[in-house]
Amino acid sequence: MRDGAWKLVRNLPGQKTPALYDLAEDLSETNDLAAQQPKRVQAMLKAIATWQTDVAKGATKQTEKPLSRD
């Protein structure tokens, strides 16, 4: 997730906690700032959860079969 220059990364293989990067200072994403910015991490995780809930409520129901391309 991006919030301005901040980028939160989660759910990568082998990743136990989210990683946070300041892309204005660290474009190559080598310096994980999650431990120094726990409030920002929590706020961004909350924003993701809110978005997921909103999408789920308004998501179009999927059909059992793929639609024909004809």
Image (cartoon, helix red, strand yellow):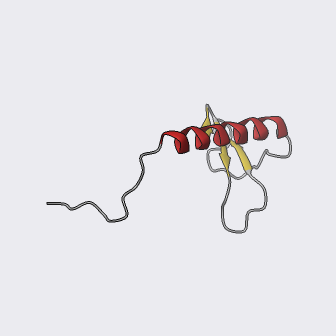
Return the x and y of residue 32 as percentages of the image width and height.
Answer: 76, 49
Residue drawn 86% across and 41% down?
36
Q: How many numbered marks have been drawn onto this rendered protein structure?
A: 0
Task: Say above or below: 38 vs 32.
Answer: above
Left or right for 18, reference 28: right
Task: Say above or below: 8 vs 39.
Answer: below
Return the x and y of residue 11 as percentages of the image width and height.
Answer: 67, 59
Return the x and y of residue 3 as percentages of the image width and height.
Answer: 63, 34
Quadrant hosting residue 12: bottom right
Q: Looking at this view, is 51 or 57 the one in front?
A: 57
Left or right for 26, reference 33: left
Left or right for 7, reference 36: left
Left or right for 22, reference 64: right
Q: Quadrant of the N terminus?
A: top right
The answer to whether any part of residue 33 appears in the image is yes
The answer to whether any part of residue 1 appears in the image is no
Q: Quadrant of the C terminus?
A: bottom left
Residue drawn 85% across and 46% down?
35
Quadrant hosting residue 49: top right
Residue drawn 78% across and 56% down?
17
